[in-house]
Amino acid sequence: MPARSARRRALVAFGSVSFAYFAYSGLFGAYAPLWFQSLGYSTLAIGTLASLQSATRIFGPYAWGWFADHSGRRTRMLRIAAAGSLVSAFGFFATPGYGWVATVMVTLFLFTAGVSPLSEAALAHLVIRDGSFDAGRYGRVRVWGSVGFIASVIAGGYLLEALGINLFPALTILLLAMLFLATGRVPAIVEPPHPVEGLAGAMRVLRRPVVAWFFLGMFFTVMAHVSLYAFLSLYLASLGYEKGAIGVLWVIGVVLEVGWFWFQGRWVHLLPLHGWLLLAAVASALRFAATAAYGHIVWVLVLAQCSHSLTFAAQHSACAAVINRHFDGPLRARGQALYSVLGYGVSGVIGGVGGGALSEKWGFGAVFWAASIVAVLAALCSWRALVLERVKAESRL
């Protein structure tokens, strides 16, 4: 009984971290582009700033994961990452100059880059049973991230509409303070330090054909979603939507995401993991094509946002399960870090800078058409991984 109570408290603590981190992510993703626009930055400059987060994810998450796996003290590293994020955000009050803001962004993103892989790796101790990924338990923790996202996007939208976009840095600091406090509740999960394998240990896993195709499909799926994270708010504002309405449209998708995470334990067995990834990629292609062609029609945009439960939530859960299947033990944090590096690093840089250039020349609609094409490439890669996984399973019979 005491063990069960301790496990429940640990899950609540991880849920609090998820709530605070994704509340920050929701506010930043939805309204940072509008704040940058208020500072007089061009869309290309805004796209470049958005790509800085992805640039830091090329090396940041793996560095955090390496130190965490080597020391075995993932909880301590998580608290350091949260503290550094909070301190960095105060730099937004110094000056609105582009160079300074870019420097603050890089520093902030270097610290936030460690939060997700470190918390996911530590959470694995509670959501893996007898070597199997417990999708139901994982979903009930991760759902609080979606709740935090919804709360911050709705409240942030109306607060910024009423009090002005200049309030954005203060709201960011408030949410990062919540994150820092939440990490203080996470139990100290300590593992014996693992021998240092460097990059070679993770690369051996990455070279497996199924794993390589999985990462390539995930790379393209996330690249397609950069159009959403970096340009949706600007696109909707250009079509005449107000900040409050933009917040509601963001939230629509996340409400469906909450439903997925809460009930995914009942559904995840209906398809193989790579089948879910294929379905998510196909849905992404349709979603972004609809957004590009009919973003001015509210009901079409609402339907497109509703697909977020598949294009993000189902895709994220399937990715987490695949990562935990192939990267276990001493490679767990580095596996989660590779997910951030390859999924949200390189792809985000290309998507952010490329999307900014496309929008400058042909408008925001072109960004979402390009995202739809990229999602088709993701579907082809996910299909290949699915075929290889089936061949591997049949060979065992």
Image: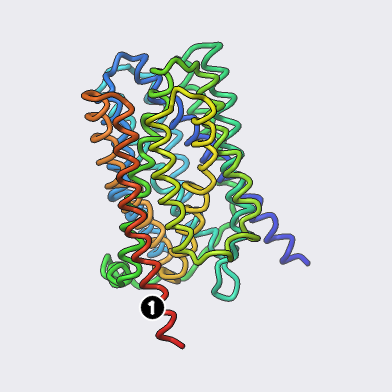
Q: Where on the picture, by quarter, is residue 109?
A: top left
Which element carries disc 1, helix, strand or loop? helix
Name the residue nearer the viewer: 134 or 221: 221
Examine the rendered structure and indicate whether residue 344 appears above or below residue 105: below
Residue lying at 49% horizontally and 36% vertically, measured from the top left:
304
Q: Position of residue 102 (x, y in %)?
A: 28, 28
The answer to whether residue 358 is seen in the rendering is: yes
Examine the rendered structure and indicate whether residue 41 appears above or below residue 22: above
Q: Position of residue 193 (x, y in %)?
A: 42, 69
Name the residue nearer the viewer: 256 or 44: 256
Residue lying at 30% horizontally and 46% vertically, measured from the top left:
374
Q: Is residue 372 left or right of residue 323?
A: left
Colouring chosen for the image of the structure: rainbow
Q: Is residue 147 left or right of residue 361?
A: right
Name the residue nearer the viewer: 133 or 87: 133
The residue type indicated by label 1 comes to Val
Residue wearing tag 1: 391
Q: Is residue 397 left or right of residue 52?
A: right
Examine the rendered structure and indicate whether residue 251 appears above or below residue 4: above
Q: Position of residue 189 (x, y in %)?
A: 55, 61
Name the residue nearer the viewer: 385 or 291: 291
Q: Position of residue 305 (x, y in %)?
A: 51, 36
Residue lying at 51% horizontally and 42% vertically, measured from the top left:
308
The answer to whether residue 103 is seen in the rendering is: no
- Quadrant of the frame with the N terminus: bottom right
Residue at the farthest right position: 1
Q: Where on the picture, by quarter, is residue 63?
A: bottom left
Query: Would you call the spot at circle 1 few (<14 residues within 10 Å), some (14-19), or many (20 or more)?
Result: few
Examine the rendered structure and indicate whether residue 312 appears above or below residue 217: above
Residue at the farthest top position: 163
Q: Where on the picture, by quarter, is residue 211?
A: bottom left
